[in-house]
């Protein structure tokens, strides 16, 4: 007679344990392919491998209905995928694209690297993207661009504020590149407006000055609810953009209507000196907010001490 409630209790406990296990052991969703994701099978050749930043740069063939043939950095979530691969290898890979992210989920070598003698170049010890022209602490040379209202802006015009600048282009199709930079800046705008109103400036500089004219940037700014008082979108001539990009060694190159590029986000102190450069998309608004706070408090102490 007593057995039944006991069994029920055991049964309930088992269900509870299974439920807990299911909740806590749920695989990180990023590793799964969400139902809404698109996947593409692509062929290409490896140009750069960067396990630290979970990135592989591939010169790839056309991805029908998505992207022309170009050389692009792609994210990998599992760096184990890069094991056994070398620069120069011909590969076949699966690209997953969701509304907010994109990454390589599978990659196979189809032909080993083209020998150095044949390709004429050994894998470079330091790639261009490792080089930052300016070092932290150095004064950032002044530059002039035009903003989304077609008005000239100068870096020196933001003196006294912490400036966070990044590079984007409005037609960028990869959710974890430019769209992520802009989404992160939107979040930064919220955080910094709360913490340090009027002591900061966000600056998104287009890498596509031919297409991204002020009116285009104005529409793009609205999409991210940019507050014009704190967040400027800038364009200019190709030479002007190249100058600013060169300061932080941003790689960017037009390719078949899109732009092959990597990422640079820089923090410049209120004194116009470079504080830090983030070289990938692996930064968070929280991290930048903290560094902005430190920079501003150092500047304040310095002003007091004088
Ligand atoms: Cu982009």
Image (cartoon, rainbow, N blue to C red):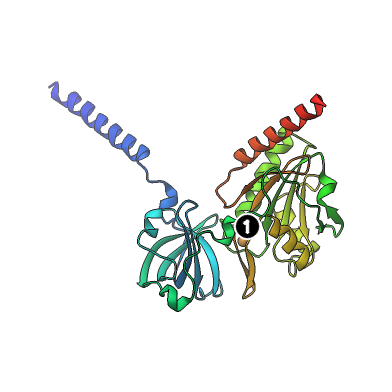
Residue 61 can be seen in this image: yes
Figure check: 196 above or below 253:
above
| Residue that extends furthest to the right in the rendered view of this protein | 151
Figure check: 110 above or below 291:
below
**Residue 192 appears left or right of 112:** right
- Which residue appears at 44% of the width and 57% of the height? 35
| Residue that extends furthest to the bottom in the rendered view of this protein | 118
Residue 195's quadrant in the figure?
Answer: top right
Percent across and percent down for residue 110 are 36, 73
Residue 66 can be seen in this image: no
Ligand 1 lies in which image quarter?
A: bottom right
Residue with the mark numbered 1? 178
**Residue 189 appears left or right of 32:** right
Residue 237's quadrant in the figure?
Answer: bottom right
Q: Front-most of 14 and 130? A: 130
- Which residue appears at 41% of the width and 46% of the height? 28
Q: Front-most of 196 and 117? A: 117
Label count reads 1
Which quadrant, please, contains the C terminus?
top right
**Residue 96 appears left or right of 282:** left
Residue 65's quadrant in the figure?
Answer: bottom right
Which quadrant, please, contains the N terminus?
top left
Percent across and percent down for residue 224 are 69, 51
Label 1 residue near ligand 1, CB within 8 Å: yes
Disc 1 secondary structure class: helix
- Which residue appears at 78% of the width and 52% of the height? 141
- Classify mark 1: residues with Cα within 10 Å, few (<14), some (14-19) or many (20+): many
Percent across and percent down for residue 126 are 53, 59
- Which residue appears at 51% of the width and 75% of the height? 64
Q: Front-most of 252 and 211? A: 252
Q: Front-most of 268 and 258? A: 268
**Residue 152 appears left or right of 165:** right
């Amino acid at each position: 007679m007593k057995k039944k409630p006991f069994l029920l209790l055991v049964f309930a406990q088992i269900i509870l344990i299974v439920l807990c296990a299911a909740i806590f052991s749920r695989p990180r969703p990023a590793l799964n392919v969400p139902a809404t994701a698109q996947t593409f099978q692509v062929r290409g050749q490896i140009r750069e491998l960067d396990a630290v930043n979970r990135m592989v740069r591939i010169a790839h063939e056309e991805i029908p209905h998505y992207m022309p043939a170009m050389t692009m950095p792609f994210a990998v979530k599992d760096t184990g995928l890069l094991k056994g691969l070398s620069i120069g290898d011909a590969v076949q890979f699966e690209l997953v694209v969701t509304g907010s992210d994109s990454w390589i989920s599978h990659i196979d070598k189809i032909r080993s690297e083209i020998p150095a003698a044949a390709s004429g170049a050994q894998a470079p010890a330091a790639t261009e993207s490792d080089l930052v022209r300016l070092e932290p602490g150095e004064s950032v040379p002044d530059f002039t661009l035009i903003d989304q209202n077609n008005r000239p802006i100068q870096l020196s015009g933001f003196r006294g504020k912490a400036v966070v600048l990044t590079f984007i282009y409005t037609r960028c199709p990869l959710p974890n590149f430019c769209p992520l930079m802009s989404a992160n800046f939107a979040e930064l705008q919220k955080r910094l407006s709360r913490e340090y109103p009027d002591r900061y400036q966000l600056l998104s500089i287009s890498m596509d000055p031919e297409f991204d004219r002020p009116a285009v940037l104005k529409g793009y700014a609205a999409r991210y609810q940019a507050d014009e008082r704190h967040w400027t979108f800038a364009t200019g001539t190709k030479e002007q953009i190249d100058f600013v990009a060169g300061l932080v060694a941003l790689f960017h190159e037009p390719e078949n209507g899109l732009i092959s590029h990597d990422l640079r986000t820089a923090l410049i102190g209120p004194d116009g000196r470079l504080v830090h450069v983030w070289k990938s998309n692996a930064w968070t608004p929280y991290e930048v907010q903290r560094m902005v706070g430190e920079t501003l408090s150092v500047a304040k102490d310095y002003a007091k001490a004088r």
